[in-house]
Image: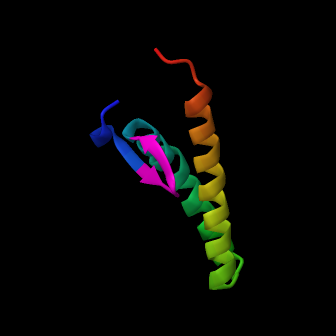
């Protein structure tokens, strides 16, 4: 893997493929969480915390999966 194929997400070095997977899978979920919190009239801090938690959990799960997945 060349260095130009790597990106840093949340302080972790990952491939562009993993970054795209994170964006593709996580963004819709984050938007749903934020929409629900806003609909429930939560504070800005609660909305931000919920979105951050979803993103961090997804990044950790996807990064871990990419580390243990068999290489093709």
Q: Residue at x 64, y 58 (%)?
A: 54
Q: Quadrant of residue 65?
A: top right
Rendering colour mode: rainbow
From this view, report whether residue 29 is shown above or below residue 42: above
From this view, report whether residue 66 is shown above or below residue 49: above
Query: Looking at the figure, which quarter contains the N terminus?
Result: top left
Q: In the image, is residue 11 part of the stretch drawn in magenta? A: yes
Q: Position of residue 56 (x, y in %)?
A: 62, 56
- The magenta stretch is 8-15
From this view, report whether residue 6 is shown above or below residue 43: above
Q: Is there any visible trace of residue 39 in the rendered image?
A: no
From this view, report whether residue 33 is shown above or below residue 16: below
Of residues 5 and 44, the one drawn nearer to the viewer in this rendering: 5
Q: Residue at x 59, y 54 (%)?
A: 29
Q: Position of residue 52 (x, y in %)?
A: 61, 65
Of residues 59 and 28, the one drawn nearer to the viewer in this rendering: 59
Q: Residue at x 69, y 78 (%)?
A: 46
Characterize the magenta stretch by its predominant secondary structure.
Answer: strand
Q: Position of residue 69 (x, y in %)?
A: 58, 24
Q: In the image, is residue 35 part of the stretch drawn in magenta? A: no
Give the total of numbered labels.
0
Q: Position of residue 13 (x, y in %)?
A: 46, 46
Q: Quadrant of residue 4?
A: top left
Of residues 31 and 71, the one drawn nearer to the viewer in this rendering: 71
- Farthest residue to the front: give it: 3
Q: Is there any visible trace of residue 50 in the rendered image?
A: yes
Of residues 20 and 41, the one drawn nearer to the viewer in this rendering: 20
């Amino acid at each position: 893997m060349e260095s130009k194929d790597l990106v840093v997400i949340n302080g972790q070095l990952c491939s562009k493929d993993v970054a795209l997977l994170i964006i593709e899978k996580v963004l819709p979920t984050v938007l749903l969480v934020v929409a629900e919190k806003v609909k429930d009239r939560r504070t800005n801090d609660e909305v931000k915390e919920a979105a951050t938690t979803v993103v961090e959990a997804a990044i950790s799960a996807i990064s871990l999966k990419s580390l243990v997945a068999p290489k093709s």
